[in-house]
Amino acid sequence: MRYLVLLIGLLSGIPSVHAQFNDKGTFHASIGMALGAHATEYERTIHILGVEVTSRKSDAAATFTFPIEAHYGLARIFSLGLNIEPGVYIDSVATRRNGLMLLGLEPRFYIVNKDRFAWTASLYFGNTRLRIDDKDGPNTSSAVYRGGHFGVGTSVIFAFSDMVGLQLGLRSLNTTLPLRSYEINGQSLSSDQFKAELKTRGTLFQTSLCFRF
């Protein structure tokens, strides 16, 4: 631990070549963890003897993801970033195996843009893919949902040195995920037999180690 403190102290003592945390031509990269809490709405439609039967369910879910971000400064007050965010989705049936992936763009605006401190506001939009595998006795099922997401967020960044810093962020994110494929015991069901859509509205807290070049 003392070696980490010493390293941070040495990095903090390096003279800064940046007048602002972000500037035109600055490259930013970060990797971290995010924990989210979400309200969910699930709608399912099945066909029974030619008749559509629709059911709806409201629930809650949590997500645990690992955001990887790369930004490029297009102006002092603005950067554009690409986000890749793998993770897991945990609903009320927490025993189901699943995989979650978000891919999107993040326009970021720098409200405060100092050398060692920045306060930002961001938009998030892109595509989300969720796969859920379930087992009920001898039967197994696999569902793939994929659709768009949109959100807004804010973060503060504390730079330990000219290159390394800590980012703390909060964002609100909405997703609309139609069911794209569904299999039961390895057999695919067509959309004429089964349709579903998952919508989520949530808040995520994120902490990341960030770098600038």
Image (tube, helix red, strand yellow):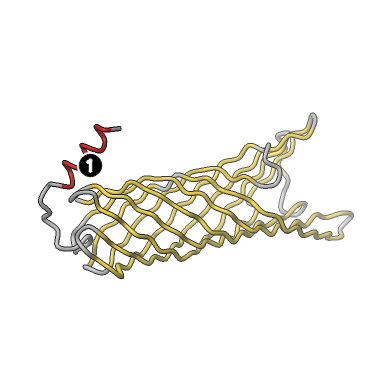
Q: Residue at x 59, y 45 (%)?
A: 89
Please, what secondary structure does the residue beneath circle 1 have? helix
Q: Is residue 145 left or right of residue 86?
A: right
Between 11 and 52, the one nearer to me in the picture: 11
- Residue plotted at (48% across, 51% down): 102
Count the marks: how many?
1
Seen at 19% across and 50% down, the residue is 213
Q: Residue furthest front?
A: 2
The one of 82 and 12 positioned closer to us in this rendering: 12
- Rendering quarter of residue 186: top right
Residue 53: x %, y % from top left: 84, 59
Q: Position of residue 160 (x, y in %)?
A: 23, 49
* Quarter the N terminus occupies: top left
Question: Quick one: 163 or 28, which is closer to the camera?
Answer: 163
Q: Residue furthest top?
A: 138
Residue lying at the far right of the rendered structure = 49
Residue at 22% over, 68% down: 75
| Looking at the image, residue 207 lies above or below residue 156 | above
**Residue nearer the viewer, 40 or 149:** 40
In the image, 1: left or right of 136? left
Residue carrying label 1: 8
Q: Hey, which quadrant is residue 51 in on the image?
A: bottom right
- For label 1, the crowd category at 10 Å Cα-Cα, with few meaning under 14, some 14 to 19 and many 20 or more, is some
Instruction: List x then y, in percent, for residue 162.
Output: 18, 51
User: Residue 37: x percent and y percent?
Assistant: 58, 54
Side of 83 relative to 202 (left or right):
left
Give the residue type at disc 1.
Answer: Ile
